[in-house]
Image (cartoon, rainbow, N blue to C red):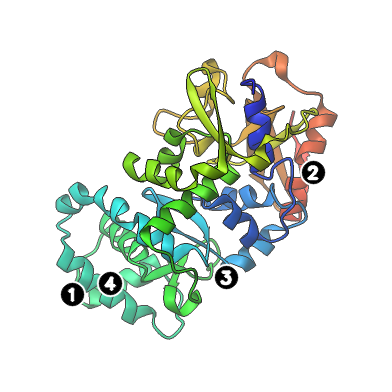
Amino acid sequence: MPTTHIPHLRLHNQKITQPELSTPQALVAHMGAMQAQDYPMSKWAVGVRLPGVSDAGIEAALDAGEIVRTHVLRPTWHLVSGQDLRWMLALTGKHIKALSVARDRELGIDTALYIRCNDLIYKALEGGKNLTREEVMLELEKGGVPTNSSRAVHFMMNAEVDGIVCNGIMQGKKQTYALLDEKIPPGLVLTREESLAALAERYFTSHAPATVQDFQWWSGLPMSDARTGLEHIKSSLQSLVVEGKTYFFTEKSTTTPTQNPSIFFLPAFDEYTVSYKYRSTVFEPTWHKEAITSNGIFKPIIVVNGLVQGIWKRTVQKNKVVIEPTFFDKKDTLPVELMEKAVEGFGAFLGMEVVLKA
């Protein structure tokens, strides 16, 4: 398998060039989890892989608990299927918590305080309430717990990782929280070893070809756990060494995907780039810093024939959305008519006219 096949296979397996699934929950479950700290862009990450679904349709899936936005892999937001959330949290939660220990000490937070806060948060939300973080913090203050913006982030993330809360119904542009057990029906119950295997299977099915280092980066698990997960499913995978790196993929991934010309305007923090430790197969080294900032911000990208060749920004106006593309190398700039066709889906997704500012 030449290196040039890897981007096309990833587009195929991530359902970007083969959008065969029909619901947000099915797509998110296939992907395992999808990074989601940029909330509007995370919805487009689902939408670009589900032609015909709308922004409102994904909101409805979130409101219904079919998919959930929470902290489940690494200390950042992800979308995950409601059916998968509990076993994933049981597997990854302690690793997420370990990353905040030093900052917890600086903020004067210990285990006893987290337990106390979880109890207050539960009481504030029980009975089907949906409260913003600010509203929850008011309840903690009433309960005698001093809060500030930094403590609020830690209190709520801990409650998410402990399986107390998940996203509630949006209030305008504000995230709310609801009790997980009131919103999400019981899902899959897996042992630790089954969870490691399941997470590895999801990743290497949806993100292949990929290395064990890529899987470890994406999952946030210790390398020993990443290797164990891979070992559990290795018999169902194929592997190939390309430029000194061992890539794993499922048998379904062995079919060479179409390499017809393709253009995609992918969102910020899209799985196509953020979910791999090694990104040289889709980036020219010169352009890496143009799309990913030094502090880890992944910009919306333009992917041409599997390679990241530019970035784009959007300006949402009253009845339209304006798209402004920027190519890293001006000679790679595409004809306007091709870019207009490529952004049609984004306009349909938002239910707005889309205007290309080339």
To which residue does mark 2 refer?
A: 344
* Whole-number angstrom distance, CA of label 2 to CA of label 4: 45 Å
N-terminal of the pair, mark 2 or mark 4, is: 4
* Whole-number angstrom distance, CA of label 1 to CA of label 2: 52 Å
To which residue does mark 4 refer?
A: 118
Query: Is 75 placed left or right of 120 in the picture?
Result: right
**CB atoms of marks 1 and 2 within 8 Å:** no
* Camera-side residue of 97 and 193: 193
In the rendered structure, which amino acid carries the disc numbered 3? Answer: Asp
* Camera-side residue of 75 and 130: 75
Q: Secondary structure at mark 1?
A: loop
In the rendered structure, which amino acid carries the disc numbered 4? Answer: Asn
Q: Secondary structure at mark 4?
A: helix
N-terminal of the pair, mark 2 or mark 3, is: 3
* Whole-number angstrom distance, CA of label 3 to CA of label 1: 31 Å
Q: Secondary structure at mark 3?
A: helix
N-terminal of the pair, mark 3 or mark 1, is: 3
Name the residue located 36 percent from the left edge and 49 percent from the top edge.
Answer: 75
To which residue does mark 1 refer?
A: 144
Q: Residues within 10 Å of mark 2 (few under 14, many from 20)?
A: some
Name the residue located 41 percent from the left edge and 38 percent from the top edge.
Answer: 217
* Camera-side residue of 222 and 249: 249
Name the residue located 28 percent from the left edge and 56 percent from the top edge.
Answer: 94
Residue 301, by quadrant, is top right
Q: Is residue 238 above or below residue 104?
A: above
